[in-house]
Image (cartoon, grey):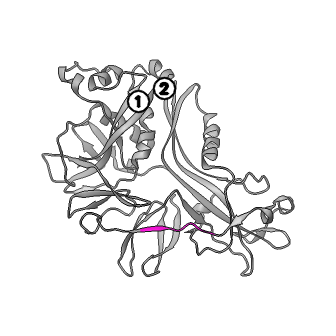
Amino acid sequence: MKLLIEHQCPQCGAPAILEETERLFTCSFCRVKSYLTRSDYFRYLLPHHAPENADLIYVPYWRYKGTLFSATQAGVRHRCIDVSHQALELATLPISVGLRTQALKMKFVTPAASGGFIEPRLAHGQVVKTFQEQFHKSLPRPVFHQAYVGDALSLIYAPFYEKGRFYDAVLNQPLPTSAGHETPLGRLPSVKSHWPLHFLPALCPSCGWDLAGERDTLALACRNCDSMWQATADGFKEINFATLKSASRDGLRYFPFWRIAARVSGVALSSYADLARLANLPVAMQPDWQHRAFRFWSPAFSLRPKTFLRAATQATLAPPRDNFTRSLPHGEVAPVTLPVAEALDSLKIILAGFAKPARRLLPRLSDILIDPQRYLLVYLPFETGRLEFIQPDLNLVINRTHLQTTS
């Protein structure tokens, strides 16, 4: 389930409700289109029901949502994660916010928010490591490598206040007696909210045309000058992209993939011939394969974990030839929802998925280094079926129901 965030238009102040993954915002009142971005991660407030004169104290909780892939002797396993964890190490407070993020509409933390905000004592890396250790226990041993893919990290602030004892301001009920005596919330240093939201006008930096895309996209398109852009804290940055040519132009849906060139050490993997040997492909070696550079391929859109790994493996093993055009697709286009940074995190898992026999390579995964050099966003055309999308060149089929990740 996605989080719902109460928000106001940065142009006219009109109210709006956003889903957690929405970035491209068009105000229904003033029609101004803007793109929401951040310098690190988003911060959210849980709503409170405290008395008007209560001095609110906001306690930080890290929230992580994503998929943990694990390369084990029994194969690549995955687990979908949606968890929160207190960032203060106070045993007298709830360890997580539980289901409140799914049941309540939250708000962005902005400089206008009142109350004191306690800074996290636990870095998010420590909390993610804790989650990883918890889930590690249920896996078959040994575990050779783990990677998070499609992760969304945020900081959720839960409200409390003191009135003789400490109160949970969401429920407006006192904490248990022991917690009320032992929790030193009033003595912890707090700060005023100083985290502004960044809204970028959704205009092409090159020609000034309106940028287009789905509300949850990470890449915006300019149809006027055939360009692609991604948002950063400093503005829009152009993306190098291409579209695979197709003989058919009817009924196609284009899906984005990251094609990644990387220097691999610890195993021979610089050419397509190396790939054929490593994956033990049941085909005759072709003379030109030795001169055909190897590339990793990873979906740039959200898929269920098994389908993600299968699509990445098939596209890497049987990549399309460079029959590309430097122009935007003419047809229905799936949004880019997986950033290239997440695709880079998945490279060893993709390698573990196609190497044969796995028992020889997996124990060596920790010694294999993958150094990404450059990447290209490639739109691949899929034929539209009743229940699935088909890419005949890659022999890849994606079921429509697999386009949504499990929560």
Check whether the beta carbons of the residues at disc 2 and disc 1 lie within 8 A of each other: yes
Q: Is residue 257 left or right of residue 94?
A: left
Residue 198 magenta-highlighted: yes
Residue 386 seen in render: no
Q: In the image shown, does 63 or 185 lie closer to the viewer?
A: 185
Q: Is residue 298 magenta?
A: no
Picture coordinates of residue 19 (x, y %)? 47, 64
* Viewer-nearest residue: 349 or 340: 340
User: Of residues 228 and 356, which is closer to you in this image?
Assistant: 228
On residue 365, the disc is 2
What's the residue at 23%, 28% (across, down)?
A: 292
Q: Amino acid at mark 2?
A: Leu
Please tell me whether residue 242 is drawn above or below residue 2 in the rendered image.
above
Q: How dense is the environment of label 1, judged by Cα within 10 Å: few (below 14), some, or many (20 and up)?
A: many
Three-letter amino acid code at the position of disc 1: Leu
Which secondary structure type mostly characterizes the magenta part of the structure? loop
Tell me the SS state at disc 2: helix
Q: CA–CA distance between discs 2 and 1? A: 9 Å
Q: If you read the primary sequence from the N terminus, does the residue marked by circle 2 or circle 1 appear first?
A: 1
Q: Kindly give the residue lying farthest to the front in the view shown.
A: 234
Q: Which secondary structure, mark 1?
A: helix
| Residue at figure coordinates x 40%, y 30% from the top left | 351
- Depicted 304 relative to depicted 352: above or below: below
For the point 21% across and 54% down, which residue is it? 329
Spot occupied by residue 348 in the image (x, y as percentages of width and height): 44, 32
Please provide percent x and percent y for residue 181. Answer: 87, 62
Q: Quadrant of residue 268?
A: top left
Q: Position of residue 285 (x, y in %)?
A: 22, 19
Disc 1 marks which residue? 351
Please state the extent of the stretch shown in magenta in the rendering.
193-199
| Horizontal side, residue 395 vs residue 215: left or right | left
Residue at 45 percent of width and 42 percent of height: 305
